[in-house]
Image (cartoon, rainbow, N blue to C red):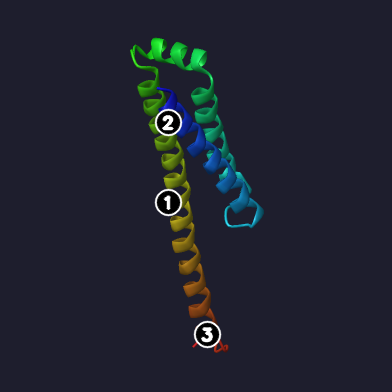
Amino acid sequence: MDRLLNFTTGVSLLLIALVLTSARRAHIRVEYSVSWLIASLAILALSRSKRLLESVATQLGIDDPPLALMILAGCVFVVTFYRFSIIISKLKDDNIALAQKVAMIEYHLKAMGGSGAK
């Protein structure tokens, strides 16, 4: 049990460091890094507090606290991935709308005899 919890702690600390470094170097926007930081801090807190982890496992009806931790970690990351899927879908829709508007502007410029894009 301790080896798994220590491994989980290491992974969550690595994820925190990676997210902070990426945010500092502007590879990830700050508003998106917050989701990852909250998720990794939640996993870190659960992996370091055996009492809290055992309480959560009992509430979930799971006999093995590390298994509860892995299930919760999976759920946290699935929710985070779902949130980003929504964001990506909205960005794709916005890109399509923008491309259509640019095409309409080019059409109107050409129709007016202007020097639109060729």
Q: Earlier in the sequence, mark 1 or mark 2?
A: 2
Q: Nearer the viewer, residue 64 or 19?
A: 64
Q: Is residue 23 above or below residue 1?
A: below
Residue at position x 42%, y 31% in the image: 73
Q: Amino acid at mark 2?
A: Ala
Q: Nearer the viewer, residue 42 or 44?
A: 44
Q: Is residue 35 above or below residue 51?
A: below
Q: Nearer the viewer, residue 60 or 8?
A: 8
Residue at position x 56%, y 48% in the image: 18
Q: Which mark is residue 89?
A: 1
Residue at position x 35%, y 16% in the image: 64
- Image location (x, y in percent) of residue 41: 56, 32
Mark 2, residue position: 73
Q: Amino acid at mark 3?
A: Ala
Mark 3, residue position: 117
Provide the secondary structure element on which disc 1 rests. Answer: helix
- Give the tally of numbered discs: 3
